[in-house]
Amino acid sequence: MFELADQPIDSAAWRTRLAHGAAGALVVFEGWVRNHHLGRPVTELEYEAFDAHARLEGEAIIAEVEQDYPGCRVCCVHRTGRLRVGELSVWIGAAAPHRAAAFLACRQVIEELKRRLPVWKKEHHPDGATEWVNCTAEAATSRLSPETYHARQIALPEVGAAGQAALAAASLLVVGVGGLGCPAALYLATAGLGRLTLADGGLVELSNLHRQILFTADEVGVAKATAAAARLKAHNPLARIEAFATRVTPLNVRTLVAGRTAVLDCTDNFTARFLLHDACRAAGVPLVSAAVHRFEGELTVYAPGTPGCLHCQWPAHRPAELDATGDCASGPVFAPTVGVLGVMQAAEALKLILRTPGADFRHTRLLNLLDASVLAVERTANPSCPVCGQPAIIRSDRTPSRPDVILTEEAFVALGPVRTAWLLEAGETARAGFPGAECVLAGDVLRLRELAAAGPLVLACRSGVRSAALARLLRAEGMGAVFARAVGAT
Ligand SMILES: [Zn+2]
């Protein structure tokens, strides 16, 4: 609940309003009128609000914070009118099941009010002089000027004013706020990005803390994305950071990836990695991926123009089976390995935005912290990759025909009504497909997976080669009734 009040705030009454049985902690912030500001004595303050807008914005802030911290109830009342020294100008209370969430929620309300609430204050000085002060402008121009904050970065010839402007226009998504995501997000939050989004459905656990450096022991049990965003905003109040306390799924991945300048894969499992890879590939968004095993790590940038794709590296995979063989999510971790790899992911993402001369995204980096070595391995595309191979190169002799995958005309008719996806090559228009079929870009595995998950599916292309290769890929992933069909030139 948010209110503007032109009378003294009754903090005891507001405290009572927040009491509820499920609350184990109440954190209260009281803002008082002080007798000086920027070295000048102050006798009184006058607050003026753009009333309707201030109420709407205040309510929106409270709603956002209550959504970020489930079970948390927040009240805020802001004074208007003339106040004497020592009077209460703003009261914020956050009641939550646990103290960590209450502290974080209260702090988030303070920061958001300072940044967004259209309230101005006029200072009255002992000599009778008065002066209007805009709280937001004051914060931005005095202690936190972006130019000063980023001065040492802008001084780099590889950045400069143009590079800083490119960073300010960029939008990055970090998926997974764990050992990799914490250091990556920390360096991205201080770079001056236009938008930084953190997505993670997990909660802070005690066994995370040795490597997930954004969290404290007090925050065990709090959503990782929310706690990380709060820490990063405190670190750099100029940064625009969003938190999605949710797992990335086939249903939300396209929305999360859409419009991004780049995405960082800081996950710890193949299922999420393939999902992100396929969504980024379909949207033409570069993906900076890293994986860690004990003292070793691997860093790869999948971007338009770089050789190969994740399916080249792991042909005919089943993500769940790959996940079952490793121990990334629950096994032993040497913390500096994820630290180094996460920071390198941030560096690669910034270089992608800055188009840094000399940046090399064609090699995969293999790091070994036992002997502190870095090996650059040239990535090669698998010419027969069903996802990124060229249709003229995916040769039929490399994908030998199997009667269970490739449908003859008679078998197709016998199948009855069935959904068909016409595979479009890059540059091919939808009109070239055949009637009744959904046109899908051949590289859009995400869409093909969605269609195959909903029931029997026929993939069609001119030669039948790409469709057979993709049908086998989907079957290897565990999709049962996926068939291929050649329809020749139309
Ligand atoms: Zn490939």
Image: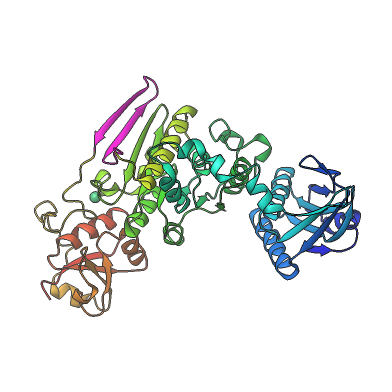
In x, y percent, where is residue 95?
77, 52
**Foreground residue, 45 or 461?**
45
Q: Quadrant of residue 121?
A: bottom right
Q: Quadrant of residue 324?
A: top left
Q: Can residue 422 be seen in this snapshot?
A: yes
In x, y percent, where is residue 233?
61, 45
Residue in the image at 24% along x and 73% along y: 430
Q: Is 361 included in the stretch rendered in magenta?
A: yes
**Foreground residue, 127 or 227?**
127
Q: Quadrant of residue 210?
A: top right
Give the residues drawn in magenta, as a range: 358-378
**In the drawing, does residue 261 fall left or right of residue 206?**
left
Q: Residue furthest left?
A: 397
Residue in the image at 14% along x and 60% along y: 465
In x, y percent, where is residue 307?
23, 46
Which part of the image, by quadrant, shows the C terminus? bottom left
Indicate whether 365 appears above or below 427.
Answer: above
Indicate whether 207 appears above or below 147.
Answer: above
